Amino acid sequence: MDLDTMMDRRHSVRSYGGIPPSDQDMDRIVAAARKAPSAGGLKALRVFVLGSGTERKCMMEAALHQSFIAEAPFLLLFCADHKAIEPYGDRGKELYCVQDATIAAAFAMLKATELGLGTCWVGAFDEAKVRKAAGLPGHLRPVAMLTVGYEK
Ligand SMILES: Cc1cc2nc3c(=O)[nH]c(=O)nc-3n(C[C@H](O)[C@H](O)[C@H](O)COP(=O)(O)O)c2cc1C
């Protein structure tokens, strides 16, 4: 699929069918995220793949109870890594690692589209609740989530 077609096809999917994406496809999506550029090549981000019903329900509650989050078979959580970006000081912490996580999420989104999967970017969430639900250490800041699955 060429890039124009992919960008035309991509849209936010908030209704998911029963068949989950394969583990192989989820690996491909995470691998695509890792290919994104990052400030100084430091890759100051972490990606978590959340597949269990309990995890997705907790994230749904942390994200204003947007119900499609629990219905999607997978949820990717993109975090900025404050420790990895330390060499770039305040600007790194406030901006670069957030951009690293964001562009990685965009790469993941396009890869999922190429694989015929639907996604929805989720930015409306309570950071403290997401931190707690995902058990994140203090140096990881949750930046974005992507639901992933086949559109119903
Ligand atoms: C930074 C950001 C935050 C978003 N947060 C949410 C969200 O919390 N819930 C949601 O349903 N969609 C969210 N979206 C998806 C947008 O609503 C969606 O991309 C927009 O309406 C355009 O529709 P499209 O993606 O189908 O082109 C978010 C998108 C971005 C880029």
Image (tube, rainbow, N blue to C red):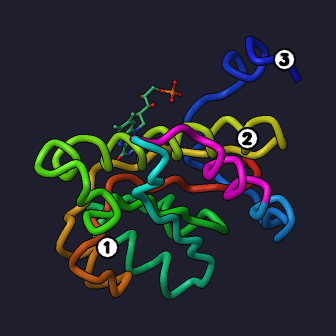
Q: Nearer the viewer, mark 1 or mark 3?
A: 3
Between residue 52 and residue 25, name the one nearer to us: 25
Expressed as whole percent of the image width and height from the top left, the position of residue 58 reads 38, 80
- Element under disc 1: helix
Residue holding disc 2: 111
Image spot of residue 72 (x, y percent): 61, 63
- Which residue occupies 62% across, 77% down? 51
With 123 as the anchor, is 28 left or right in this view?
Answer: right
Disc 2 residue type (three-letter): Lys
Q: Residue at label 1? A: 61
Mark 2 vs mark 1, CA separation in Å: 27 Å
Give the mark, 3 or 2, whose residue is nearer the N terminus.
Answer: 3
Expressed as whole percent of the image width and height from the top left, the position of residue 140 reads 30, 70
Q: Residues within 10 Å of mark 1 (few under 14, many from 20)?
A: some
Q: Nearer the viewer, residue 112 or 100?
A: 100
Bounds of the magenta span?
Answer: 28-39
User: Looking at the image, is mark 2 or mark 1 earlier in the sequence?
Assistant: 1
Look at 39% across and 69% down and name the residue there.
60
The residue under label 3 is: 2
Identify the secondary structure beneath mark 2: helix
2 inside magenta stretch:
no
Distance of label 3 from label 2 (alpha carbons):
12 Å
Proximity of marks 3 and 2: CB atoms separated by less than 8 Å: no
Query: What amino acid is found at the position of numbered circle 1 in the picture?
Result: Glu
Ligand 1 falls in which quarter? Answer: top left
